[in-house]
Amino acid sequence: MLSKIVRTVTNEFMLFIVVFGLYIIAHGHLTPGGGFQGGAVIVSGVVMLLVAFNSQELKKTLSERVLSIMESTGALIFIALAFAGIGAAFFYNFLVGTPILGRIPATGPNPGDIWTGGVIPLMNLAVGLKVVAGLSAVVLALALFSSGEEMEE
Amino acid sequence: MAALITHSPILIIAIPLLAAFLTLPIGRAGGKARNVLVIASLAFVEFLVIILARDIYLNGIHIYTLGATSPELTLPGGAMVPIRIILEVDAMSIFMGIIWATVSLAAAIYSLSHMARETGQNRFYTLLLLMVAGCFGMIFTGDLFNLFVFLEIASISGAALIAFRTRFADAVEGGFKYIVISAVAGLIFLFGVGLLYAQYNSLNIGFLANAMQYSTLDIIALTLFLMSLTIKTGMVPLHMWYPDSYTVAPANITAMLVITSHACMYAVFRICFSLYGITLDATTVGWIIVIIGLLTMFVGVTMAVFQTDVMRFMSYHAISQMGYMWMGVGVGLAVLGNPEALATYGRDAISGGIFHILNHAMYKPLLFMTAGALFHRTGTRDLNKMGGLGHNMKFTLILYIIGTLSIAGIPPLNGFASKFLIYESVYQFNPVLAVVAMLVSIITLASFTKAFQSAFTGPQLPEYKDVKEVPKPMLIGMGILAAGIIFTSIFPGLIVERIVNPATDALINQAAYVNGIMGGGMP
Amino acid sequence: MEHIPLNFPFLAAALLVGISLYILIFKKNLIKLIMGIAMLAAGVNLFLVSLGFRAGGAAPIYTNVTEGPMVMPVPQALTLTSIVINVAVLALMLTMAIHIYRHTGSLDSEKSRKMKG
Amino acid sequence: MRKVVGLIVLPVVIAFLVSGMLLLIHPFGYPDASDMDDYIIQNAQEETGSNNVVTSVVFDYRGFDTLGEATILFTAVTGVLLLLRTEKRRREGS
């Protein structure tokens, strides 16, 4: 448990990291980035919290039950999106051309319109959720295991 | 029903994945609901595999392009190279699929009671389902990088399951060795995939086989492929990790891990026959495989003779039985060049090797499960400490006898049928090989009777007086495999003609595999 | 032979793989073994990424890009997958190393040789 | 024994790789063939609707790899939490 100043600064700073991570996830289909990269940014924020507060403190907020539910929902959304295109084939991008997220960008260089990409932004969000929940559970479990207790509720 | 058949290759992989993601939330609700989910999903996958197999035996190779407007569209308009990932299921892949579906169903039923008293069961079944999905992905995919991804899934879930009993030091040791070997093998395989991608700019096996010019880089890539995948099957120079890992895993996980090494062996055959085919100088590669198979057979059985730990004893036998398969298919590969020798004994050698995969995939998991049953009741794996268990554990005794007779190749049972097919064809190729193979089979029989004697017969030891028979699910799990062995023993001809020969022809016939990809283009 | 100076990334990848094989064969400490595998993964990833480079190519993203050739996207996708796989493998290996240290009190793989035979 | 095997195998493999890399592979920046990638670069925007061609390859053209990869991450997390579980409730039983 580091000093009070470090803990408050980390609290404030965590918001910026989460917003930046969400930006990378949400704009995965426009600018470099995507589910995995944005998720990793947010997990680096979680590790920062772990360093500032000790693992017992963090375990209260990020309990094992919350993280495993988040991870399972992320995984289920991802595979549900993959299954949804089963009409044509398993991983078919069924949202391209439809009003939901389906606008086709002008071919060639263009300023980039967020309402494009069909299933891809949704998959980015699902994978981002999964990466955040999964990797922070691993980091928390390793920290707790070395200090004696375990993650189980 | 027709839609189910067209989508069945991807459903067979995706349903265990879906069930794995669901196991954790449902497992919180209650153990019963989770067990029902696991067994139901594996039973449905078995059903899908059977209807897919029927469809493939009727009208040939089954193609599934992921993400295209229609599953059969392999070459999108205007492109001469397949863009998306294509699952290509031919008779050989579905042959491995049948084995894997049956053994994983039996192992899952077996683990219902074998794991009843362990903690962390939710995650155990999640990893079990992921391993099932991983191995199906390896078997069905027609894409090299996809093969690497599913190889890794099967390896990681296998390693975590090997180290399941974290209270034993050697369990975690075994898991660590397995994950190190798998990681190194996967990365070396990936290096080979990179080499092929650099030259032909494609990752699809069919397209690469068509565009292959067998340059020196391709030879380097072939050596990397063979080196990495044969490590995973426990070939002789690098087999020391195999017994260490397979001894400490829970019995049903070892039963499934044996089949994952079969899947790696299938990947080697796919690369040698379908990817390289006649372009590689088959005789040298064939001879290398035959010699390594011979060495594996011999070293495996000699190391097994003086083992005291029953699981380690059976792991060494698993290595030596793999030698038979390597030898059988290696001989077929060696004569791939001249069609006349191929017709006389080459094709029989490959059929013998593949039939031996089927038999080994039934009696080896059965033997591991009987060893698990002994461990379940006596708490020890040391043969010296066991004795006279035949009195109380009747069914396990019968199942053990079936497994032993089959592995030793005693005439009525199926082990003999495939070994005889291998002896007969390998003898025409080179008599020395057949002689060594028979010698190894005799040593196998000797060592198994010794193990049988020390575990089951003899006076009833005082401390095992009250040992009861193993609970029902374990007997059902072992019963499925025993029934498979008996069925194959009664109708070997039927099995060979209906299942093994189409698989052999699918393996040899590279043109059909390539045409499945290149011929399937629609605008 | 004129392209030898050009092939420096491939040479670096091959050397990385060579060094990691040295570590895997000769080093005893488990943590060094894990580092060796991380280095092998880095070498293979470097090799995969540098396969897709096109001289003078820009990143294959159409948002506000200037005209000109584009780098090949598929090796980048493969490398992304390979990196995540190596994260997963490393996490599992480190967990097992913790357990081994807790059981045997040492990270030396010699002690685990006792299971030989 | 391990040292001897290592000393023989290692130089061979390194020479193998370095020679392969330096002499045989295509010069860095000038790939031998690139028809699959050219097709993807031209058609990614129109078929998948995303400007970032790499993301369209990751999530649409080769989406199955990413499903496998997400599974691998899920496996690793489940495996790590499985191995770091408590042993207190040993006799829980289902």
Image: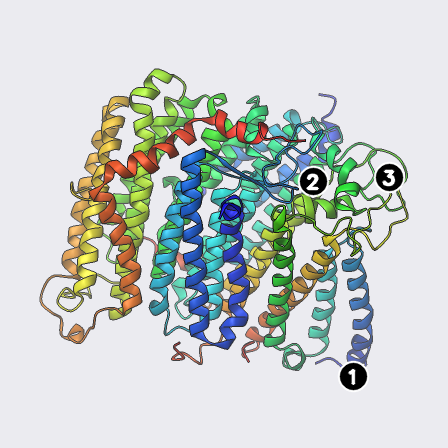
Tag 1 residue: A4
Amino acid identity at mark 2: Val
Question: How much space separates mark 3 and mark 2, taking CA atoms?
Answer: 19 Å
Residue C108 visible in the current orientation: no
How many C-alpha atoms fall within 10 Å of the one at disc 3: few (<14), some, or many (≥20)?
some
Name the residue located 30 percent from the left edge and 28 percent from the top edge.
Answer: B348
Amino acid identity at mark 3: Gly
Foreground: disc 2 or disc 1? 2
Mark 3 falls on what kind of element? loop
Q: Are marks 1 and 3 in contact (CB under 8 Å)?
A: no
Residue at mark 1: chain:
A
Tag 2 residue: C74
Location of residue B458 in the rendering, given as x and y in whole percent from the top left corner: 10, 63
Mark 1 falls on what kind of element? helix
Tag 3 residue: A108
The quarter of the picture where residue A62 lies is bottom right
Residue in the foreground of this view, choosing between B98 and B177:
B98
Q: Is residue A70 above or below residue C32?
A: below
Mark 2 falls on what kind of element? helix
Q: Is residue B54 left or right of residue B142?
A: left
Amino acid identity at mark 1: Lys
The quarter of the picture where residue A121 lies is bottom right
